[in-house]
Image (cartoon, helix red, strand yellow):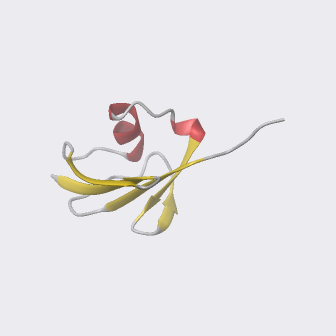
């Protein structure tokens, strides 16, 4: 199934497996879930949220430091 993935300024359509969660998607694109906030169709979601056909997934890097 296909979704739209947005990371920063980069936007692309990608194919993912059915029944993938946000955490599965992040693992597939080599991003640690604890370093980002994920929005699905403009709503912030948790790692266990299922990703469905046609979803808009936006990955937002969390900036932190000391």
Q: Quadrant of residue 24?
A: top left
Q: As displayed, is residue 22 above or below residue 56? A: above
Q: Residue drawn 19% across and 42% down?
A: 17
Q: In which quarter of the image is the C terminus?
A: top right
Relative image position of residue 54 (x, y in whole percent) = 22, 63
Total numbered circles: 0
- Residue at position x 35%, y 45% in the image: 21
- Residue 9 figure quarter: bottom left
- Residue 13 image position (x, y, % from top left): 22, 54
In this view, the residue in front, 15 or 24, is: 15
Image: 35 above or below 55? above
Residue 27 versus residue 63 in the image, above or below:
above
Residue at the farthest left position: 1
In this view, which residue lies farthest toward the right? 66
In the picture, measured across the screen, residue 32 lies left or right of residue 4, that is right
View extreme (bottom): residue: 42
| Residue at 44% from the left image edge and 46% from the top image edge | 48
Instruction: Report the residue at 73% width, 41% height from top.
Output: 64
In the picture, measured across the screen, residue 12 lies left or right of residue 21, that is: left
**Looking at the picture, how far across and down is residue 37, in whole percent?**
55, 51
> In the displayed structure, would residue 27 be above or below residue 38?
above
């Amino acid at each position: 199934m296909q979704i739209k993935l947005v990371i920063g300024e980069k936007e692309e359509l990608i194919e993912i497996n059915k029944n993938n969660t946000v955490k599965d998607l992040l693992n597939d694109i080599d991003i640690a879930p604890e370093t980002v906030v994920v929005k699905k169709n403009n709503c912030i979601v948790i790692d266990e949220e299922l990703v469905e056909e046609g979803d808009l997934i936006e990955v937002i890097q969390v900036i932190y430091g000391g």
